[in-house]
Image (cartoon, rainbow, N blue to C red):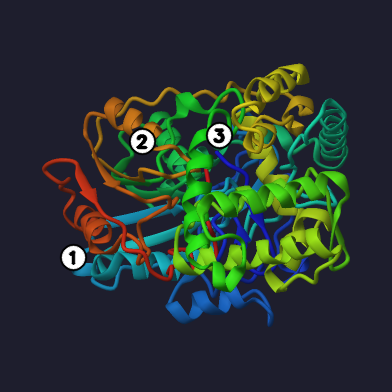
């Protein structure tokens, strides 16, 4: 799983960069309380009261859902499933009913990744991606606990993400160790009672509570990125309760340890070089270099300048720990518009490195605000809680330092980013073992690009090999993360997925597709999903 950075203009899903921001819930006052204590020791958790989705005059997400014909509800579930009569939380749900009830297939739930990306706001876009098949499904979006339109878990951080580079030396690593320890301590102080209950296994239990509340014996499921892991965990914990499963950007659960981004240095470098080739072809516009090597040299020069002195970008100072994140953030989109957006960011950073100061555009300013001031910190708090429950990693920070030193010579940029210490080293230990063994014989259609930098293609192949009743759609020559529902995969991917959802019949054999490079139409309409 990877680290998503949501920003005010677009969400840099630690890298899928170009996507418009969806509105957040209207106000904190409109949200349900984070935890309640029931007066009835055996409350009925299965009552759904469907109503309008709009929560207030500024709730653009609710307005879009109402316009699409959706209804919304909340489901009360246990905070701790080991104590079902204890405290509870409310899970936000939105539903589009099947427009062709005479030929209704069933209910499809979906998850957009993150972890902690909201799902509900993507309901109209998921329906559009399914085309005519959508008319035969009740399509249901569920915001996982503490995300989206649910009451957030907020650690009060002054950053939306813990993700940083360790920097070029031991002093920088020690500085980041103190930074990550401080984030964990602050979260324990402010939200410690909730942290044990934020995990993928509990999100899967919530999904099953939604299934039961909908009166469905089985549900179909679509998951992208982290959503594939959620779907895999659900099928393992609740066998026999899924019908048709689609996984896009496929996780191999056995590869999640020892920490979230372990072992992805090379695929990220490959994707970065691919992007640099695009930037070189547009050198007259962006001035980053006329060859891929020249572009990469420009990026190295930006990093070196940030090591000497933090870059001055608007009111922000971009230091040696934050500057490398931009190299990571070019990855996972692989479309013309996304490539152009991030090239503009590097043009600004190059100016800051060369002249001492540059003014950011709206996108870069939003990214820096989220990373350096805490705009949207509740999202980062919740995402971290999921990551630390699912991939807690070593408690000994020296393990991270040795990994950085081991990879630095071959991967001087990505080694210190992807192996850096995280708050998970200082997080409260998870209440249950996060490892879920997945072994399925239900029909599943998997989709993955060969150059996916977020979930390496090798993981999709390994998962496919261990899932006998599955087929794999491979998008060759592509560095995109998440293909279905965009123009990028065109009919080869989209029509194959929709035919499977419509008929329940998998393709006769695995399928290979070529990418169609175009302006992206994000399936979520708002979110880039990463690992």
Which circle's residue, 2 or 3, is located before the other in the chain?
Answer: 3
Q: Residue at x 30, y 48 (%)?
A: 476
SS at mark 2? helix
Image quarter (top left, top right, bottom left or bottom right) of the N terminus: top right
On the image, numbered disc 1 is attached to which residue? 103
For this rendering, which residue is in front, 485 or 62? 485
Q: Real-space Cα distance between discs 2 and 3?
A: 17 Å
SS at mark 1? helix
SS at mark 3? helix
Q: Residue at x 36, y 36 (%)?
A: 460
Q: Is residue 52 left or right of residue 165?
A: left
In the image, residue 247 lies at what x, y percent?
A: 36, 45
In the image, residue 415 lies at what x, y percent?
A: 64, 31
On the image, numbered disc 3 is attached to which residue? 265
The answer to whether residue 354 is seen in the rendering is yes
In the image, residue 529 lies at what x, y percent?
A: 52, 52
Q: CB of mark 2 within 8 Å of CB of mark 3?
A: no
Numbered disc in front, either 3 or 1: 3
On the image, numbered disc 2 is attached to which residue? 460
Q: Rate crowding at label 1 as few (under 14), some (14 to 19) or many (20 or more) other CA atoms within 10 Å.
A: few
In the image, residue 336 lies at what x, y percent?
A: 46, 67
362 above or below 382?
below
For this rendering, which residue is in front, 79 or 316? 316
């Amino acid at each position: 799983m990877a680290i998503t950075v949501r920003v005010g203009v677009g969400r840099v899903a630690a890298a899928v960069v170009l996507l418009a921001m969806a509105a957040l819930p209207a106000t904190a006052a409109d949200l349900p309380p984070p935890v309640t204590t029931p007066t009835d020791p055996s409350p009925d958790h299965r009552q759904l009261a469907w109503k309008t989705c709009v929560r207030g005059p500024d709730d653009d997400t609710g307005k879009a859902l109402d316009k699409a014909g959706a209804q919304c509800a909340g489901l009360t579930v246990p905070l701790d499933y080991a104590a079902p009569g204890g405290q509870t939380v409310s899970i936000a749900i939105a539903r589009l009913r099947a427009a062709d009830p005479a030929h209704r297939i069933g209910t499809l739930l979906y998850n957009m990744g993150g972890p902690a990306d909201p799902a509900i706001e993507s309901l109209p876009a998921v329906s559009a991606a399914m085309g005519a098949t959508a008319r035969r499904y009740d399509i249901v979006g569920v915001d996982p606990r503490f995300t989206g339109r649910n009451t957030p878990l907020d650690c009060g951080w002054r950053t939306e993400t813990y993700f940083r580079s360790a920097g070029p030396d031991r002093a920088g690593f020690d500085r980041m160790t103190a930074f990550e320890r401080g984030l964990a301590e602050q979260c324990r102080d402010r939200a410690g009672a909730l942290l044990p209950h934020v995990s993928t296994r509990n999100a899967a239990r919530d999904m099953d509570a939604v299934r039961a509340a909908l009166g469905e014996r089985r549900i179909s499921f679509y998951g992208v990125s982290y959503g594939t892991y959620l779907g895999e965990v659900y099928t393992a914990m609740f066998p026999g309760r899924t019908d048709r499963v689609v996984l896009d950007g496929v996780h191999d659960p056995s590869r999640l340890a020892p920490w979230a981004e372990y072992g992805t240095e090379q695929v990220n470098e490959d994707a970065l070089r691919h992007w640099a080739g695009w930037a070189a072809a547009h050198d007259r516009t962006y001035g980053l270099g006329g060859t891929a090597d020249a572009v990469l040299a420009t990026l190295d020069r930006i990093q070196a300048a940030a090591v000497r002195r933090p870059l001055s970008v608007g009111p922000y100072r971009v230091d040696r720990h934050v500057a490398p994140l931009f190299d990571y953030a070019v990855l996972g989109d692989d479309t013309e518009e996304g490539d152009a957006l991030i090239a503009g960011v590097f043009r600004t950073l190059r100016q800051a490195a060369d002249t001492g100061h540059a003014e950011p555009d709206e996108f870069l300013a939003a990214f820096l605000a989220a990373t350096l001031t805490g705009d949207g910190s509740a999202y980062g708090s919740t995402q971290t809680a999921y990551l630390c429950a699912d991939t807690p990693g070593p408690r000994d920070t020296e393990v991270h330092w040795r990994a950085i030193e081991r990879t630095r010579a071959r991967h001087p940029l990505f080694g210190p980013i992807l192996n850096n210490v995280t708050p998970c080293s200082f997080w409260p230990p998870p209440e249950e073992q996060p490892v879920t063994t997945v072994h399925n014989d239900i029909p599943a259609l998997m989709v993955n690009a060969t150059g996916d930098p977020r979930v390496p293609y090798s993981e999709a192949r390994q998962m496919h090999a261990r899932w006998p009743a599955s087929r794999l759609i491979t998008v060759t020559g592509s560095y995109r993360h998440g293909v279905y529902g965009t123009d990028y995969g065109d009919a080869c991917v989209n029509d194959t997925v929709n035919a499977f959802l419509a008929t329940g019949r998998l393709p006769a054999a695995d399928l290979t597709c070529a990418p169609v490079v175009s302006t992206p139409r994000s399936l979520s309409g708002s979110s880039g999903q990463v690992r």
